[in-house]
Amino acid sequence: MTNKLVLEAAWCLTNIAAGTPEQTKSLLPTLPLLIAHLGEKSSLSVSEQCAWALGNVAGESDELRDLLISQGALIPLAKMMLPDNSSTIRTVAWALSNLIKGPDPDAATELVKIDGVVDAIVRHLKKSLFVQTYKLSFSLSC
């Protein structure tokens, strides 16, 4: 399947995952495929679209969030935080926040154990603050 077709399929799944709880649950058979396309295994656009779909699924319920964690979504999503691609970082950070939220801290504990992820999160926060500060100072100087 070509990259463009995979991207379109992932986009469709993302939209289904944003639907009703029943529609989101209908995606259960596709979750391993979405996870498999995270990170370096696929193009950046496909990986980002799959992260978005998984974020929608994770945000639907504790049950689906736990299922994604048990299927191994946490590590490949977290590793997508390591490069410096701002568009991807926003999507992945949002998906990870849906994946680790809830009363059970185990997923968050596992996230911070993944090599380089905390440093990447801090780096992206600093970069974001710098960009926002620069935009504000530029606006004020005009």
Image (spheres, rainbow, N blue to C red):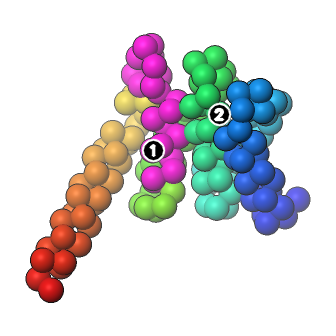
Q: CA distance from mark 2 to mark 1?
A: 14 Å
Nearest the viewer among 38 and 140 is 140
Left or right, 140 with reference to 26: left
Q: Would you call the spot at circle 1 few (<14 residues within 10 Å), some (14-19), or many (20 or more)? A: some
Quarter holding the N terminus is: bottom right
Farthest residue to the left: give it. Answer: 141
Give the structural element (helix, strand or loop) at label 1: helix
- Which residue is located at x 45 percent, y 13 percent? 104
* 71 lies above or below 43: above
Left or right, 10 with reference to 66: right
Mark toward the start of the polypeptide (2 vs 1): 2
- Which residue is located at x 28 percent, y 46 percent? 122
Q: Would you call the spot at circle 2 few (<14 residues within 10 Å), some (14-19), or many (20 or more)? A: many
* 57 lies above or below 137: above
Report which quarter residue 77 is drawn in.
top right
From where the camera sits, is residue 38 visible? no
Magenta stretch in the rendered image: 89-110
For disc 1, the marked residue is 93
Q: Which mark is residue 60?
A: none
Marks counted in the figure total 2
Q: Is residue 65 magenta?
A: no
Magenta residues, dominant SS class: helix
For disc 2, the marked residue is 57
Farthest residue to the top: give it. Answer: 104
From where the camera sits, is residue 122 visible? yes
Quarter holding the C terminus is: bottom left
